[in-house]
Amino acid sequence: MLTRAAGMVAAFLAGLALVVAAVLVVRHLTEPSEPELPVIPDARRPVVEAAVRTCSPLSVPLLAAQIDAESGWRRDADSGHAQGISQFSPVTWKEWGKDGDGDGKADVWEPRDAIPSQARYMCHLYQVVKVVPGGGTRLGATRLALAAYNAGPNAVLRARGIPEILETREYVDKILNELLPKYQKSEKRYQESEAKHTSSASASPATP
């Protein structure tokens, strides 16, 4: 009798375990998974971090979000009228393109040239849009500067705001409402990971 009872208990527990496992699997499959966050490519992080230090209104997540919207981080991006990772038109590059990697040449296809030039140009645009209604606030100035980067500063000045250009409005909205929050979360995770790594490294005993 005891052996039979023990067998029944074992069978019950095995069945219960299967039920619990099935519930957990179903829950995992039905629960909405957190969307994967975009990240700054490792090769581009140093130049992005250095670029934002030249322009106080910019931040690493904001510049990253803008680059993502412009080219998806592709150095060979070519829209037909704008080129490179930062999508400069030839006319704008002629004025704002600078040598960032020290090779003596300002190359629109070289991210180490284009990204610092993008940051400097954005800094200029922040100054330009100050006279436009809404340009006196941080968010307002950012919206207007992004619009000016996309449509040109004269278009923003003429419109006294974001021009009635669908591409420009979608561009500003994509960066600020879609990409920026994701890059802010991504950057927070990166900084937390770096802090843990640094703390772990400093806590490790030094080897003789």
Image (cartoon, rainbow, N blue to C red):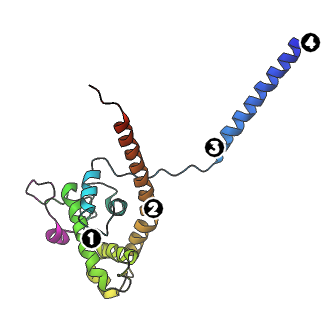
Q: Is residue 92 magenta?
A: yes
Instruction: Name the amino acid type tagged 4.
Output: Met
Q: Is residue 64 left or right of residue 124?
A: right
Q: Residue 97 in the image: x percent, y percent?
A: 16, 65
Q: In the image, which is nearer the foreground, mark 4 or mark 3? A: 4
Q: Mark 4 and 3 residues: CB-CB less than 8 Å, in contact? A: no
Screen quadrant of the C terminus = top left
Q: Residue 160 in the image: x percent, y percent?
A: 34, 87
From this viewpoint, which residue is outermost toward the left?
A: 104
The earlier-in-sequence mark between 4 and 2 is 4
**Helix, strand or loop at mark 2:** helix
Neighbour tally class for label 3: few under 14, some 14-19, many 20 plus, Cα within 10 Å: few
- Spatial separation of the CA atoms under disc 2 and disc 3: 26 Å
Identify the residue shown where x is 37% and y is 83%.
161
- Spatial separation of the CA atoms under disc 4 and disc 1: 83 Å
Q: Which corner quadrant of the image does residue 47 belong to?
A: bottom left
| Mark number displayed over residue 7 | none
- Spatial separation of the CA atoms under disc 1 and disc 2: 20 Å
Name the residue beneath numbered marker 4. Answer: 1
Q: Mark 2 and 3 residues: CB-CB less than 8 Å, in contact? A: no
Name the residue beneath numbered marker 1. Answer: 122
**Helix, strand or loop at mark 3:** helix
Q: In the image, which is nearer the foreground, mark 2 or mark 3? A: 2
Q: Residue 159 in the image: x percent, y percent?
A: 34, 86
Please report the bounds of the magenta region as a residue range: 89-105
Name the residue beneath numbered marker 2. Answer: 181
All told, the count of numbered labels is 4
Name the residue beneath numbered marker 3. Answer: 29
